[in-house]
Amino acid sequence: MLRQQFVSTPVKEVLADNHTLAVMPLAKQCEPFEAGMITTGLEGLAAPAVSEVWTVSQPTERGQTGNTYWSKTSELICLAHWLSKDECENIEQYTQKAYESVLSVMNEQGFTHPFRFWNYLPAINEGTGDDELYKKFCTGRLKAFENAGLTPANFPAASALGHHSDGAVVYLFACNQTPQHFKNTKQVNAYEYPRQYGISSPSFARATALTLNDVNYLFISGTASITGHQTLGENDLEKQLEVTQSNIEHLLTNANPENLTLSTFKVYVRHPADVAFTRSWLEARYPGVEMLFTIADICRKELLVEIECFCI
Ligand code: 3EB
């Protein structure tokens, strides 16, 4: 059984529990420490320090293969790979290398199906046109997927956000069951976005569903105020929240084969001043959902907020 929780327990204590698959503290740091601990560079708003924790019911085994850190049970594996500040200067090439490493270690460890990716990058909106850092990241990721024989039908759910620290991290979950990937018919598939969004389209599905040991899960990708391929509600936080909500609700209705319930939101807010409004807007509409709020740059400059979901 896989669970996501948001806790204020000290990281060391969380890590000492071998039922912790991975702990992600919210801190301005994006560098490797030890297997099972994933610093992302993403910060929260204020003290008390909060961490995201993924727990499993089976005991984990953790290890490191080259520069890829992993943590696994018999049913799933979490793999993480960081890029240094220098490597981020050549984000396309090192993203490709990072993806190639995590996919090869995944295979070596006996897992075949990646089902959820997270990508946290520095200065994600820097550079103009095709030179924007996020767009170069997309090219590196796509090249690695193509080399691994992963076709758009097999791209899993993902999130890609910017932080204000040095270094980048890519981490993923993988298993041996075949996941189901879903599109959102209100949006153009990300891997079919038109040319104006970059040379290489973003490689992800809108949602991924899977069953492990008879338990069903649904991962909804980072979801934002996009209809078709267009950003809606520029400079209008509430409009962006409304469009984002309608995209999430659409996926819960049309991309949710087991009719699962929202368990958690990880909410990415560009401007710290927008967190309070975003929090009260979401809490009023989703009283039963646990929420983590982080300060992050969204991969399109006009986007103010993005929300990912976990359903069980
Ligand atoms: C979008 O829908 C918003 O590049 O992995 C959301 C989720 C977004 C994942 C990614 C990007 C990614 O296009 C951005």
Image (cartoon, rainbow, N blue to C red):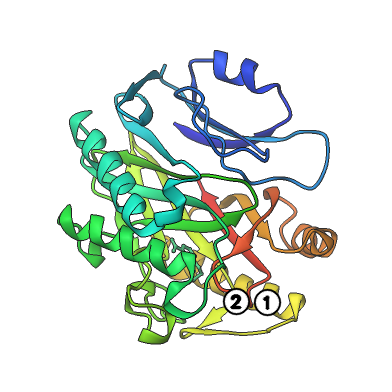
In which quadrant of the rendered view does residue 93 lie? bottom left
> Is residue 194 positioned above or below 159 on the image?
below
In which quadrant of the rendered view does residue 144 lie? bottom left
Provide the secondary structure element on which disc 1 rests: helix
Residue 37 visible from this viewpoint? yes
User: Mark on residue 2?
Assistant: none
Q: Report crowding for label 1: few under 14, some 14 to 19, many 20 or more residues within 10 A (C-alpha).
A: many
Residue picked out by circle 2:
225
Determine contact: label 1, label 2, CB under 8 Å. yes
Q: Mark 1 or mark 2: name the one nearer the start of the chain.
A: 2
Q: Which of 121 and 148 is in front in this view?
A: 121
Where's residue 33, x and y in %? 51, 25
Where's residue 169, x and y in %? 47, 44
Q: Report crowding for label 2: few under 14, some 14 to 19, many 20 or more residues within 10 A (C-alpha).
A: many
Where's residue 58, x and y in %? 41, 20
Provide the secondary structure element on which disc 2 rests: loop
Mark 2 residue's CB less than 8 Å from ligand 1: no
In which quadrant of the rendered view does residue 75 lie? top left
> Is residue 305 positioned above or below 84 on the image?
below
Marks 1/2: CA distance?
5 Å
User: Which residue is at 82% across, 34% downward?
Assistant: 48
Residue 258 visible from this viewpoint? no
> Callout 2, which amino acid?
Ser
Q: Does residue 271 appear left or right of residue 213 in this picture?
A: right
User: Mark on residue 240?
Assistant: 1
> Callout 1, which amino acid?
Gln
